[in-house]
Image: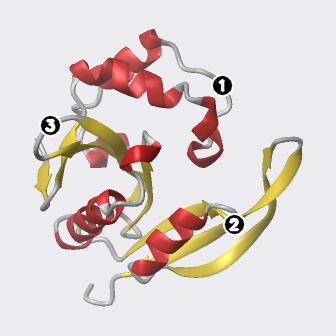
Amino acid sequence: MITLKGTTIYLRALEPEDLEFVYQIENDESIWNVSNTQTPYSKFLIRQYLENAHQDIYEAKQLRLAICKNDTFEAIGLIDLFDFDPVNNRAGIGILIQNETNRGNGIGKEALSLLIDYSFKQLQLHQLYANIGMDNEASLNLFTTFGFQKIGVKKDWIYQGNSFHDEALFQLINHQH
C-alpha cells in the first residue's frame, strides 16, 4: 500500500471502507464539470471499482489516492494519476477536495506536491498533464504554482449550464529525467 505523508495530510490507497466517501463525490453534480462525470454512479459500481483498486498503476493505468488529514485520518479529497503511459513516461493528474471548507488552505497544494514528487521520483515519469476548465481559477493557480505551463486551449470543450466552455491543457516536464 502506498502512503505518502506530508505536514498536514497524507495520501493513501483507496479501501473498501471508502465506499460512501467515493459515492458522495462521484454523485455530487456540483463537481461533475471538473471530474468529467456525466451520470451518477451506483454503489454497486463503486464497490466493484474499490474491489479492483488493488491493481497497480501498470495494470490499471491509473492511480487514485485518498487525501486524508493527519490529525483526524478523515478522507477529504481524491487525487489521481490517469491515462498512465509507461512507454512515453507520462500521465494525467487531477485533484478534488470535497468540501469547500477544506479548500484554499494549502491542502490541495500539499497533496499535489506529494504526487508530483512521487510521479517523478518513484515512477520516473517524464511529464504530467492536467486538463483544467478556463473558469476554474483555483485549479489554474494551483497547477501553475508548480510550474505547469498552458500548452493549448480546447475551444468549447465542456458543455455545462447550457453553454460551452474552454478547457486548457497544462503540462509539467521533468527535466531531471
Q: What residue is rendered at 55% in x and 70% in y? A: 140
In the picture provided, is 161 more to the left or to the right than 138? right
Category of crowding for the residue at label 3, using alpha-carbon neighbours closer than 10 angstroms: few (below 14), some (14–19), many (at least 20): few
Q: What residue is rendered at 62% in x and 61% in y? A: 136
Q: Which mark is residue 92?
A: none
Amino acid beneath label 2: Met
Q: How far across and down, in percent of the image, does residue 102 sit?
A: 36, 48
* Quadrant in the picture for residue 111: bottom left
Answer whether residue 91 is visible to the viewer in this image: yes
Figure check: 166 above or below 41: below
Q: Which residue is mark 2?
A: 134
Amino acid beneath label 3: Phe
Upstream in sequence: badge 2 or badge 1: 1
Q: What residue is rendered at 35% in x and 25% in y? A: 21
Q: How much space separates mark 2 and mark 1, taking CA atoms?
A: 22 Å
Closer to us: 136 or 2: 136
Category of crowding for the residue at label 2, using alpha-carbon neighbours closer than 10 angstroms: few (below 14), some (14–19), many (at least 20): some
Q: How much space separates mark 2 and mark 3, taking CA atoms?
A: 33 Å
Q: Which residue is mark 1?
A: 39
Task: Single out the mark in the foreground, 2 or 1.
Answer: 2
Task: Single out the mark in the foreground, 2 or 3.
Answer: 3
Q: Residue furthest front?
A: 101
Closer to us: 113 or 172: 113
Q: Secondary structure at mark 2?
A: loop
Q: Secondary structure at mark 3?
A: loop
Q: Which residue is mark 3?
A: 73
